[in-house]
Amino acid sequence: MSFFRRKKLPSAIKPSVTFGRLLYQRIDHDGLTMLAGHLAYVSLLSLVPLVTVVFALFAAFPMFSDISEQLKSFIFSNFVPAAGNVIQNYLEQFVANSNKMTAVGTCGLIVTALLLISSVDSVLNTIWRSKNKRPIVFSFAVYWMVLTLGPLLVGASMAISSYLLSLNWLAQTGVNGLVDQVLRIFPLILSCISFWLLYCIVPTVRVPPKDALIGAVVAGLLFELGKKGFALYVTMFPSYQLIYGVLAVIPILFLWVYWSWCIVLLGAEITVTIGEYRDYRRQKAEQQEQKPEGQQE
């Protein structure tokens, strides 16, 4: 009868299977796809206000006037893999119309943009099972800092990169080619850094930086692969264009935003599961030590 007994997993793959089981249980319990759908809906509502606030910040700083158009092209080509030009044209029209708004309307745009950041905060703390609450003033300060300093830091990094590429002595030393190679993977680097900061700063509990880095790298790689795969899907299977025609950009954008949030939240789940797996191993080791010598495996 021993033949019919369930065989034990090989020791080499047992940790991976255990980790995968813990990860699946967390994803199923948290309802990752529902959380991603909620964030996708809020993102679409906040998209125009967020873009308006970001490029209003660039307009307020003359040093970013030259880099503003370059940043627009960078964002839409690297973070909106399909129909990026169409979406960019529509958003620029919306932003131009928002310039005619009153002070009350402008405040409403800022509040709507902050709503997205608040929703991300709430969802990530749900994943981390955190019940700690930040003071309202502190939360507002963090949201405002993300909304204002985030775009400025990205613009500054791109301005520095453009300046380095323009230096003649870099081309003569051969460093220019190295910088060019770094710029090719800059979207991946930027994604990983952004995810790492998101997983480290937003939760109201302490997150080990190493765990957050692993989750961020996985999410960054999936995000880059997702861009290529999504663009290929829209190109090879143009069902949305055939059904919706000119309006196809709306479901395409929503589908991409939803998929992006699934990747971001998956990275968060991986980050949390790493800590849970570490605790699981520790508990198993303690139980093993408490067993009599004859019963130990």
Image (spheres, helix red, strand yellow):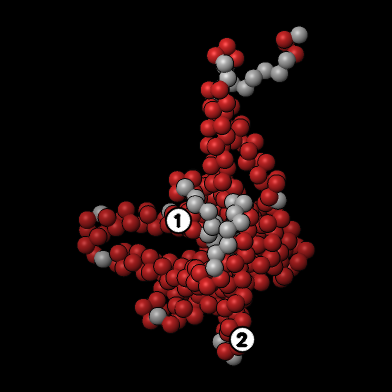
Nearer-N-terminus badge (2/1): 2
Q: Residue at x 54, y 68 (%)?
A: 135
Q: Quadrant of residue 48?
A: bottom right
- Residue denoted by label 2: 105
Q: Residue at x 46, y 68 (%)?
A: 150
Residue 104's x, y, as percent?
60, 88
Residue 245's x, y, as percent?
74, 68
User: Which residue occupies the extreme top position in the image?
Assistant: 1
Looking at the picture, tell me which residue is in the foreground, 246 or 195: 195
Tell me the SS state at disc 2. helix
What amino acid type is highlighted by mark number 2? Gly
What amino acid type is highlighted by mark number 1? Ile
Residue 84's x, y, as percent?
58, 66
Residue 203, can we see it?
yes
Q: Quadrant of residue 286?
A: top right
Q: Residue at x 47, y 70 (%)?
A: 145
Tell me the SS state at disc 1. helix
- Residue denoted by label 1: 193
Q: Quadrant of residue 83?
A: bottom right
Is 52 left or right of 170, judged from the image as shown?
right
